[in-house]
Image: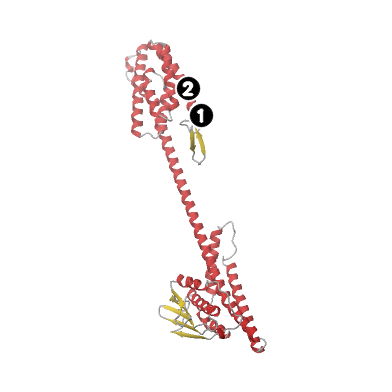
Amino acid sequence: MTATGAHQDGTGTTTRTWLWWERRRSAALDMGLALLSTLECVGEGARTAERIGIPISLGILFGLLAGPVLVLRRRWPIAVVLVSIAVTPLEMGYLLTIVGLYTLAASEVPRRIIATLAGMSLTATLIISFVRLHQDVQSAELVAGSIWYVPVIAAMVSAAITLPPVLLGLYIGARRRLMESLRERADSLEQELSLLADRAEQRAEWARTEERTRIAREMHDVVAHRVSLMVVHAAALQAVALKDPPKAVKNAALVGDMGRQALTELREMLGVLRTGDGGPRSAASVPLAAVGAAAAAAAAAAAVQDGPSLADVEDLVEQSRQTGMVVELAVQGETREYAPEIEQTAFRVVQEALTNVHKHAAGAKVMVRLAHRDAEVAMQVENGAPDAAGAAPGAALPSGGNGLVGMRERVLALGGVFVSGPTDTGGFRVSAVLPHRDGPGG
């Protein structure tokens, strides 16, 4: 027998099928049962033919035709049961009846059909058993007191042949359907878990991307301003080194101070990133994505708590003044504390705006305004047109084009408003408004 197709089993493995059998073992079992059924039908057919006075060869022919039908039990269980009912009057096919009823009850055939065919088989077996027993009783000339013997024994025989295979088949069929249902639920649950894992990995990747962006923004804010001031002071130092030694010494000291401050801020930031996971953990006990997300969140929180505030804006302005820039600071409203993220974002906006003036508008006058309002805090940094005469020679600074983008991201993340653009006088204006959130002392 040759393979005729492919089939996937419960594990998803593709196997070859033999006609309607999914496995060779099933085919071997059915062929073995069909062989036994054929031998039984041939023997019973020969005895029945001899008893009722017909040619024995005819009984053997019936047995050869009926017995092999059992090989079709998985494909056509109804046909097998109908054949077993048809040969019941010849008192053959007991194995055919038992296995056929079991297969029918365990299959996906509707229950009403199973009940109908089982009832027909029971009735046929009951009638044949009754007639045969009645004949045996008459031939044995039993006493008249045995009137209930024949029907009771016939009912017991027919029930013993019909009911056990039907009940067992119903149980096996229900168990099989339950297992299939559980397998489908397990597959569905596995798919859901896989989907959740994919989503968790996506969220972790998103968190890592956001954290990388935040770190890059912090590094830009910390480094760009300090280094810009250092470059300006270094250019001024170069210009006055020979003409005004005391001023050159002062500028050199300022460059050193700026460098130390930049190194201190970088060291603090890197220290926060190294200890942001809250302590050592076993790599086997916590997933990498969870550790990375927790570390990123902790690092972000620590960086915000330890970062600069609005109280440092005056020092920031003073540092720019020391480079020769003309900067005015105006504060409106009552000064108060805000949430740490509000304080840090406001400081970074002013810092980056001043850094941009150093880069793109050397020698320009700058106006820094802070306004403390009831529901918000506003800041504005506006510079006039660049003045090449007031710029230190050799102080040209490169620009990565990320300053305004970083400021906008910071402000919008807190629900604020950010506006930037050139002014009518040839300068540039950066404005931001952040919603009020009480800080520790607010």
Number of residues whose C-alpha sits closer than 10 Å to that of mark 2, classed few (under 14), some (14–19) or many (20 or more): some
Count of numbered badges drawn on the protein: 2
The residue pinned by badge 1 equals: 2
Spatial distance from mark 2 to mark 1, Cα to Cα? 23 Å
Above-or-below relation of 5 to 90: below
The residue pinned by badge 2 equals: 36
Q: How is the rendered protein coloured?
A: secondary structure
Indicate the secondary structure of the residue bearing disc 2.
helix
Type of the residue with mark 1: Thr
**Image quadrant in which you'd find residue 412:** bottom left
Residue closer to the observer: 398 or 135: 398
x and y percentages locating residue 94 in the rendered image: 42, 22
Q: Is residue 164 visible?
A: no
The C terminus sits in image quarter: bottom left
Above-or-below relation of 385 to 223: below
x and y percentages locating residue 115 in the rendered image: 34, 31
Apparent side of residue 285 relative to residue 191 in the rendered image (left or right): right
Which residue is drawn at the image coordinates 40% and 80% (left, top)? 374
x and y percentages locating residue 277 in the rendered image: 56, 65
**Image quadrant in which you'd find residue 256:** bottom right
Type of the residue with mark 2: Leu
Residue closer to the observer: 24 or 130: 24
Number of residues whose C-alpha sits closer than 10 Å to that of mark 1, classed few (under 14), some (14–19) or many (20 or more): few
x and y percentages locating residue 307 in the rendered image: 54, 75
Q: Is residue 69 visible?
A: yes
Residue closer to the observer: 113 or 317: 317
Of badges 2 and 1, nearer the viewer stands 1
Which residue is drawn at the image coordinates 42% and 12% (left, top)? 56
Indicate the secondary structure of the residue bearing disc 1.
loop
Q: Kindly check if marks 2 and 1 are in contact, taking CB atoms under 8 A apart as contact.
A: no
